[in-house]
Amino acid sequence: MSDETIISQLKKSFLFRGLPNEALIELGRKATRRGLAKDEVLMRKGDVGDSLFMISKGWFKIVTEDARGGELVINQTGPGETIGEMALLDRAPRSATAIASSEAEVLELKQDAFYEILNQRPDLALELIRSFSSRLRFSTTYIQKAIEWSQKISAGDYSFIENTLTVSRAEGTDEDKASQLLSAFFQMVRNVKDREDQLKQQVERLILQIDEARRKQEFEEITSTDFYADLKEQAKKLRAQRAAQQDQK
């Protein structure tokens, strides 16, 4: 990879674009290029975090698992953004899984090389703080939106799902982005509720059918008894007597 290509790719990174060309070239020489196919996993939640990734092409969805093991998308990242730097700083396992949502390309920078550059460029720490601050603001917005929508669902209001607009990956506010990411999850909630409503309707129809069959069975059981036959015969005789009396008048 030429120095010009290295500089061009790294200048797309929000984290490293403030570095001079010489530092970018040195950084690029320490980084490893990696291409990924759509749906390929870049890193998994719980993995040891020994490198960060700078996205030069393509998009990634950042996912975690819900209580049932299903995939829950918590963010999307694209060209110019970095993934995995948090684990380098706190030395904790990866907090989420990153999956390519399109064909993608990243530059991987190992921990030792990252700390070497950080020691040489203290101003890079400020860019890291800005990056974390941006993610924290988004996380706060995401949580607030999730709480707001959960409260609406508890009140039986699902109108916000239909009113959620599709937001371009590169556009929109944090609230727009959070709404778009959460809409898929809450649409799933709506679908579950719709299935529950359908099931309730089916149960109600089944109960009516059972009650109708039971009433029919009870009627047949009553009308087949000797007592009912005698009662019916007596009623017939009584009607005949009344008719005779009317004719005599």
Image (cartoon, rainbow, N blue to C red):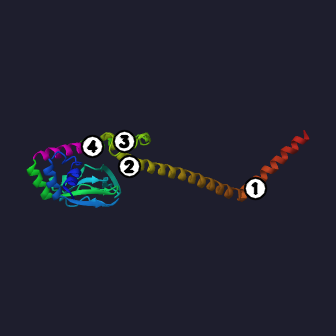
Residue most extreme to the left: 119
Mark 3 / mark 4, whichever is N-terminal: 4
Report the mark closest to the observer, 4 or 2.
4
Q: Which residue is mark 3?
A: 149
Residue at mark 3 to residue at mark 4: CA–CA distance = 16 Å
Residue beneath the point at 76% across and 53% down: 232
Q: Give the magenta range.
A: 122-136
Residue beneath the point at 84% across and 44% down: 242
Measuring from the top left, give residue 76's x and y in whole percent.
31, 50
Measuring from the top left, give residue 131's x and y in whole percent.
20, 45
Magenta residue check for 248: no
Residue at mark 1 to residue at mark 3: CA–CA distance = 67 Å
The numbered dot on residue 185 is 2
Relative vertical location of residue 70 with respect to residue 159 in this rendering, above or below = below
Residue beneath the point at 16% across and 51% down: 24
Residue at mark 3 to residue at mark 2: CA–CA distance = 11 Å
The numbered dot on residue 138 is 4
Give the amino acid type for the residue marked by disc 4 in the picture: Phe
What is the magenta segment's predominant secondary structure? helix
Residue at mark 2 to residue at mark 1: CA–CA distance = 67 Å
Report the mark closest to the observer, 3 or 4.
4
Q: Which residue is mark 1?
A: 230
- Crowd rating for badge 3 (residues with CA inside 10 Å; few <14, some 14–19, many 20+): many
Q: Are marks 3 and 2 in contact (CB under 8 Å)?
A: no
User: Depth check: 246 or 120 in front?
Assistant: 120
Could you say whether the residue bearing mark 4 is in a helix, strand or loop?
helix
Could you say whether the residue bearing mark 1 is in a helix, strand or loop?
helix
Residue beneath the point at 10% across and 47% down: 122
